[in-house]
Image: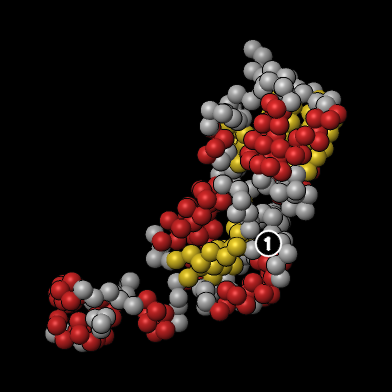
Amino acid sequence: MAVTLREVAERAGVSRSAVSRTFTQGASVSAKTRKKVEKAARDLGYSPSLIARSLATNRTKLIGLIANNFQNPVFLEVFDLYTRALQERSLRPLLVNLTDQTDPSASVQLLKQYSVDGVIVASSTLPPLFAHAFKEAQVPVVHAFGRFASTPDIHIVGIDNEHCGAMAAETLFKHGYRHVAFLGGPQSATSAQDRAAGFFRRAKEIDLSIAEIQYADAYAYDSGQRAMGTLLQNRKFEAVFCGDDLICMGAMDAARDAGLSIPQDIGFIGFNDMNMAAWQAYNLTTIRQPTNEIILSSVELVVSMLETPGRAPEVRLFPCSIVERSTLRPLKK
């Protein structure tokens, strides 16, 4: 049978409240009492019950982590970072896999059943309605990788996707390309819309001709491969800006299957700088999204909302950068 708090108190010769304070972060307890309680707990093999503590404090320390792009390996990197960042703050993630067809109100009810203390929507493809549904239900929420808003009504942490699209156009022009294609993620995703808008705007300003436009049906390797097959049917372009690394890898392999050499026959620039982008098989020139900074900042915000309810919403945008590898032809000296 599990050792109880009462048994630890009796063994240590202290009150049950002293034992409880010893295992409550930030609670006041003397060094002498702490030492006696910890020794008694070790001797008896006692571990404090998180469930019992949540009932006493009305806090579960559960943070709902919502995502919907599980087929993309970049999410494994994201989930690893979120798990470690939350655990370092004595919080625990409750992972929820949603699709954009899921009813936001049903998502709220699902997470409220677990009495989560807060929610992080970690997706650029889920509609903004998801984050807003949690706010309306008075659940602290942060939208990570969310769309920029000049007057936000929820906390948003991410990047300026339009600016990143412009960076892609400038990079292709700098490398000597004049006729290019755009291959984005799902057209319904706000990130794909904004990257495309920035790319098209900057291309027009610098006289970079956009010969073809195509959208993949998912942020997935197979989707990039299929979309690139369509683009290659009428190839009047020298390089492609892909709005996601995994889509870009599929597109690169489709180009190779068609007998094209990279970057001699066709160039590629991706987006994200996921770990696979540096693999020798791809060595992809890409736009680095500062994923770690976004994750740490979104965790910091959700923690601050727990400590300061009613905190005014804010937007935190992080700069992106070009990672030069070998999928674009060399710069002219």
User: In the displayed structure, would residue 160 be above or below residue 50?
Assistant: above
Q: Residues within 10 Å of mark 1 (few under 14, many from 20)?
A: some
The answer to which image quadrant residue 49 occupies is: bottom left
Q: Is 262 in front, or is 13? A: 262
Which residue occupies 56% across, 47% down? 73
Q: Report the number of discs.
A: 1
The answer to which image quadrant residue 18 occupies is: bottom left
Q: Position of residue 198 (x, y in %)?
A: 76, 41
SS class, disc 1:
loop
- Please name the amino acid that badge 1 sits on: Thr
Q: Work out whether residue 194 can be spotted.
A: no
Which residue occupies 46% across, 58% down? 83
Q: Work out whether residue 94 can be spotted.
A: yes
Q: Position of residue 197 (x, y in %)?
A: 79, 43
- Quadrant containing the C terminus is top right
Task: Look at the image and name its color scheme.
Answer: secondary structure
Which residue occupies 78% across, 49% down? 187
- Quadrant containing the N terminus is bottom left
User: In the displayed structure, would residue 255 be above or below residue 61?
Assistant: above
Q: Label 1, on which residue?
A: 99
Which residue occupies 56% across, 28% down? 281
Q: Position of residue 162 (x, y in %)?
A: 73, 44
Q: Is 143 in front, or is 10? A: 10
Taking the image as shown, residue 225 lies to the left or right of residue 280, namely right
Taking the image as shown, residue 140 lies to the left or right of residue 147, namely left
**Outermost top residue:** 333
Q: Position of residue 195 (x, y in %)?
A: 73, 43
User: In the displayed structure, would residue 9 be above or below residue 231?
Assistant: below
